Every structure is written in C-alpha cells, then in structure tokens.
Amino acid sequence: MGGKVPIIVKEMEIADEGKKLLVNECINEWLKSPHAQKLVKHDFWKRALHRHVSTSVGKMIAEYMIIAHWQPVFKKMRDNGSLTMATEILSKMKQIFSYSIRSGKLAANLLSELRADDVGMKPKAGRRYFSDKEIGMFWRAVDNTNMTKQSKLFIK
C-alpha cells in the first residue's frame, strides 16, 4: 500500500463516507456564505433553488451524481417554457458546487462541463437607451460630485 497503514486508510474512507454532502446541504451552505448573503436577489435564489433543484434532486449525494440525474431538472424547466431560468439555475449550481469545492467539502463539479445551450438558452443581450429623464438625473449627479470642472465637462 505504499507506506500506508491499511486499517487507517479504511477508517479514513469510512469517515469520509459519512461526510458526503447532499445537494440540499451544498445549497444551504452556499446560501449562508458571505458572498451569497451579499446578493441583492438572495431570497429569489433561495426560492428558485428550492423550487427547481431541492424538490427533485436535493436529497441526492452530490458527489455520486452524474449529469443524467440533472437532465430531468432542466427538462422540466424547458417544458414549462423557462429556458432562461434553466440556464440561470445551471450557472448558480456551478457556483454552488465550486464553493463546495473551495470549502473542501466536494471533490468535483460535475456540472462544469454543461453549457447554457445544453440546458436551455443563453439570455439575449438587449439594447437599452436612457430616457431624457435618466440623462437629466445623470447630469445632475455629475454636477453634485467633487470632481473638477474639467472632469465634469469631459464626462458630460
């Protein structure tokens, strides 16, 4: 065994087996993380992850899952017409599993190979133009800063 004591190796394997995280546990730990707590849409993500992920694969052990376990989750969202939500959930779950890896509780992120095209669709980039009111608000905000007159003129 290359210098390893077999009984200690076996004890470590048994101890590690009891520490395997469920998908729900990964989600909950991420939701409690400082990064997630700063999210403006924290409550939105908590509800969305519960609705779309926890109810279907939340009780599965994250480490043992394969991509085929996730396909019904994304298919259900696609069938309900939520193509962009499927893409957003994929992105969020990638973040959650990456956080679990960084915190030493998960070995690999199996969703890292999936792309937005595989589960839904990429959100379309739209064009937006400022209204006259928004432009006026911006100009007044620039005037109220501590910038030099030349900087204010340059920005305007």
Image (spheres, helix red, strand yellow):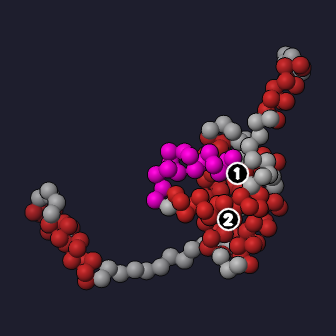
Residue 14 shown left or right of residue 49 in the figure: right
Residue 113 shown left or right of residue 65 in the figure: left
Q: Which mark is residue 51?
A: 2
Q: Give residue 42's position: percent from left, percent from top.
A: 52, 57
The C terminus is located in which quarter? bottom left
User: Is disc 1 placed on a helix, strand or loop?
Assistant: helix
Judge the density around disc 1: few (<14), some (14-19), many (≥20) Cα neighbours within 10 Å. Answer: many
Task: Tell me the amino acid under the disc marked 2.
Answer: Arg
Majority SS type along the magenta span: helix
Q: Give residue 14's position: percent from left, percent from top.
A: 85, 30
- The residue that appears at 85% across and 24% down in the rendered structure is 11
Q: Does residue 110 show up?
A: no
The part of the chain drawn in magenta is 24-40
Q: Work out how far the residue at label 1 is from the one at label 2, CA to CA, in angstroms.
A: 12 Å
- The residue that appears at 32% across and 79% down in the rendered structure is 130
Residue 13 shown left or right of residue 148 in the figure: right
Q: Which mark is residue 24?
A: 1
Identify whether 143 is placed above or below 28: below
User: Is disc 2 placed on a helix, strand or loop?
Assistant: helix
Residue 92 in which image quadrant: bottom right
Identify whether 111 is placed above or below 51: above
Task: Tell me the amino acid under the disc marked 1.
Answer: Asn
Task: Examine the structure image and report whether residue 123 is included in the region drawn in magenta.
Answer: no
Q: Give residue 123's position: percent from left, percent from top.
A: 57, 74
Which of marks 2 and 1 precedes in the sequence?
A: 1
The N terminus is located in which quarter? top right
User: Are circles 1 and 2 on residues that touch, CB within 8 Å?
Assistant: no
- The residue that appears at 46% across and 51% down in the rendered structure is 38
